[in-house]
Amino acid sequence: MLRLTSTIRKELLILLRDRGGLAILFLMPMAMITLMALIQDAPFRDYQELKIPLLLSNRDTSTLGKTIEEGLRSAKIFEITKTGQPESSIKQSVKGGDYEIGIVIPENATTILNSKVNAFVNAKLSAAGLSDSLKAAPAAPGELSLLIFFAPDTKKSFKISILSTLKQFTSKLETQTLLDYFSKELNREGTLSGKENKIDELVSFKEMNTVETPQEMLQLNSVQHNVPAWTIFGMFFIVISMAGSIIKERDDGSYTRILSMPGSYITVMAGKITAYLFICMIQCLLMLMVGIYLLPLLGLPALVIGHSVSAIILVAVCCGLAATGYGILVGTLFKTHQQSSTFGAVSVVILAALGGIWVPVYVMPESIRILSGLSPLYWALSAFHKIFLGGGSFMAVLPYALKLLAFFGFTVGAAWLFNKTKNK
């Protein structure tokens, strides 16, 4: 026990004497969290919070044009500018970036729609032997097309969403028009009593929460993503300092002198892990405080940490152990400080990119998402998201914690085996 406590004391004294390095360990992740949360605030907002500039040319003064325009305004996500410009001018305005979307509703669109419905109804009733009006029915009119212009950089998923929304605005009107014409023809034939045929909503949609938590906990924003993400990144970046400490001890002979004392290699590593784990926990606490108190002062939402403090502590400790175990492995495998620092920094950045630290995993390609499951940073981030966004409990994050502990055990075991083989 004395050997363990002495090792812990030695490591903490070394860290405290290097005040510049200690400040970097704490201040750099805090600066990264603040900067990235500010930069990514707008991209993380929902479209409902934004106003999409839309240029509308409604040349139809009847039902169809009014229905589409009212539907666009009721959506409350468009900043609508009405214009009487020709199609070429609207196209240039959207192409030039002045507007995200341009919509042209052609003249007499409602008249064309009614004519198409009339021809369709007459054809169906005549085929059923209920009417002979097909003989006198006019020829079906030409195509009814609404012109939609999108900005060149508009994503395909956004285009599909807008087209679906416009189709929703027109589908009920189409159905109502069909029903009115069928009723009119059947009434004329005496097969249907005269009644108002108003279509009500047959299917409604009700949004339900998946967890019993306040609504703000269910929204992924820049704060809810970046605070846990860069906290994990900062904890894993301790690998550079930890590996450098191991290599320095090996180069100046301190490691040999330590091994000459009574005790085992495991005890020495346990003391080093405990000291650096303590640093990781301070890092984690400071990062959470930044999210809760500092970011709201900069106009960002406050970090919502859920209601399970025990789950946060479990994930933080397991993440710290995984980071320190990785530091032990890197410091044991490499011979020089340049090798360990370069490999440690690059490998942590790669694991962070795969783990969803830079951007959320769900926006990555399928092949990258498969590799993300191999990153310990992904396990830690998923656990924090389950706590912060889903109100996860201790048991909910236990599988992720066990994965992190397994990674810690693997790295420390591999370092011990390599060191034992090298000493032989």
Image (cartoon, helix red, strand yellow):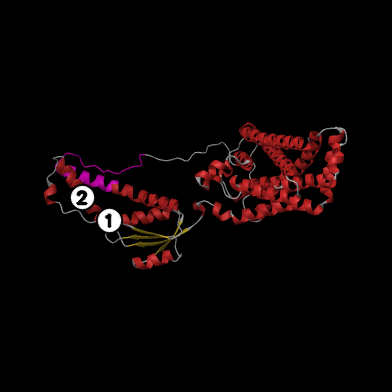
**How far across and down, in percent of the image, does residue 279 sit?**
76, 44
In three-dimensional space, the C-alpha distance between marks 1 and 2, rounded to whole angstroms, equals 14 Å
In the image, what residue type sits under mark 1? Answer: Leu
Q: Could you classify mark 1 by the number of other residues whose Cα lies within 10 Å: few (under 14), some (14-19), or many (20 or more)?
A: some
Q: 413 or 77, which is in the foreground?
A: 413
In the current view of this chain or complex, which residue is farthest to the front?
424
Relative height, residue 149 to residue 369 (above, below):
below
Q: 28 or 35, which is in the foreground?
A: 28
Image quadrant of residue 152? bottom left
Provide the residue span drawn in magenta: 175-202
The structure residue drawn at horizontal position 26% and vertical position 48%, both measured from the top left corner, is: 177
**How far across and down, in percent of the image, does residue 224 sit?**
61, 47
Could you tell me if residue 253 is visible in this image?
yes
Asked if residue 188 is among those painted magenta in the image, a careful observer would answer yes
> Left of 288 or right of it: where is 146?
left
**Numbered circle sitting on residue 244:** none
Question: What element does badge 2 sit on?
Answer: helix
**Numbered circle sitting on residue 144:** 1
Q: Which one is closest to the eye, mark 1 or mark 2? A: 1
> Left of 54 or right of it: where is 352?
right
**Numbered circle sitting on residue 118:** 2
**How far across and down, in percent of the image, does residue 253 sit?**
85, 44
The image quadrant where one finds the C terminus is top right
